[in-house]
Image (cartoon, rainbow, N blue to C red):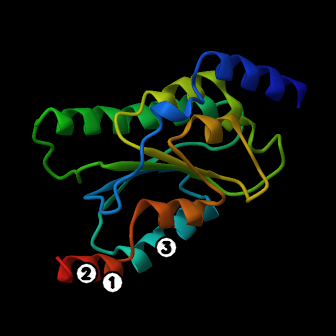
């Protein structure tokens, strides 16, 4: 825990947590990038929530380990893959067979402080801040906090909540369009 507090203080001093740099995700994404483990319950929860809320929004999954010594590097690599796609799209480059990435979700279910430790990595913190599109972190349960939460544009209390914050329900979008 002391290591967590030291890292948090150092990253905060570097400005990684500044509210002024945080962006609000679009309520109507054209596509969502998702980073989590293939075997995670969080993946199932996020996919279920997105299918219910916005089945028309394509999701591009880039899997990564979410626990263990190799997890931080895998998480960074997965995010960088999505960033490369989003950046090319923002520059007008065609990316056939890939959805447009307007929002990125970085999610993992709950666990102990040790289980969630990958999300306290300094390199991952810098990678989160470098996102070319709004990034929502949903790691752990409501009471869990990681450095990734402080760096993200939006912190969600759970992976399901991250999915809900990423896309407005289809019905609400239709009602808004009808009132225009």
Callout 1 crowding tier (Cα within 10 Å): few <14, some 14–19, many ≥20: few
Q: Is residue 38 left or right of residue 30?
A: right
- For discs 3 and 1, the disc positioned in front in the rendered view: 1
* Secondary structure at numbered mark 3: helix
Q: Is residue 80 left or right of residue 41?
A: left
* Secondary structure at numbered mark 2: helix
Callout 2 crowding tier (Cα within 10 Å): few <14, some 14–19, many ≥20: few
Q: Which residue shows up at 56% across the image and 29% down it?
A: 18
* CB within 8 Å, label 3 to label 1: no
Q: Work out how far the residue at label 1 is from the one at label 2, CA to CA, in angstroms.
A: 5 Å
Callout 3 crowding tier (Cα within 10 Å): few <14, some 14–19, many ≥20: many
Where residue 117 sits in the image (x, y, percent)?
Answer: 75, 36
Q: Which residue shows up at 77% across the image and 50% down it?
A: 144
Along the line of sight, the residue nearer the viewer: 118 or 161: 161
In this rendering, is residue 143 above or below 178? above
Residue on which disc 2 sits = 174
In this rendering, is residue 129 above or below 145? above
Where residue 102 sits in the image (x, y, percent)?
Answer: 31, 49
* CB within 8 Å, label 2 to label 3: no
Mark toward the start of the polypeptide (3 vs 1) = 3
Task: Report the quarter where the C terminus lies.
Answer: bottom left
Q: Which residue shows up at 54% across the image and 40% down it?
A: 152
Mark toward the start of the polypeptide (2 vs 3) = 3
* Secondary structure at numbered mark 1: helix
Residue on which disc 3 sits = 49
Q: Work out how far the residue at label 2 is from the one at label 3, CA to CA, in angstroms.
A: 18 Å
Q: Which residue shows up at 21% across the image and 81% down it?
A: 179
Q: Is residue 9 left or right of residue 55?
A: right
Residue on which disc 1 sits = 171
**Corner quadrant of residue 172:** bottom left
* CB within 8 Å, label 1 to label 2: yes
């Amino acid at each position: 825990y002391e290591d967590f507090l030291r890292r948090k203080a150092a990253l905060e001093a570097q400005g990684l947590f500044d509210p002024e740099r945080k962006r609000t995700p679009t309520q109507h994404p054209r596509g969502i990038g998702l980073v989590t483990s293939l075997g995670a319950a969080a993946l199932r929860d996020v996919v279920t929530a997105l299918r219910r809320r916005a089945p028309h929004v394509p999701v591009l999954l880039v899997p990564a380990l979410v626990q263990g010594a190799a997890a931080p590097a895998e998480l960074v690599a997965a995010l960088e893959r999505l960033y490369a796609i989003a950046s090319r799209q923002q520059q007008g480059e065609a990316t056939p067979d890939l959805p447009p990435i307007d929002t990125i979700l970085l999610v993992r279910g709950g666990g102990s402080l040790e289980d969630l430790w990958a999300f306290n990595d300094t390199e991952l913190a810098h990678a989160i801040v470098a996102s070319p599109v709004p990034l929502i972190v949903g790691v752990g349960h409501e009471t869990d906090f990681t450095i990734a939460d402080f760096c993200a544009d939006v912190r969600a209390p759970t992976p399901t909540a991250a999915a809900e914050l990423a896309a407005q329900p289809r019905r609400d979008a239709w009602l808004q369009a009808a009132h225009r």
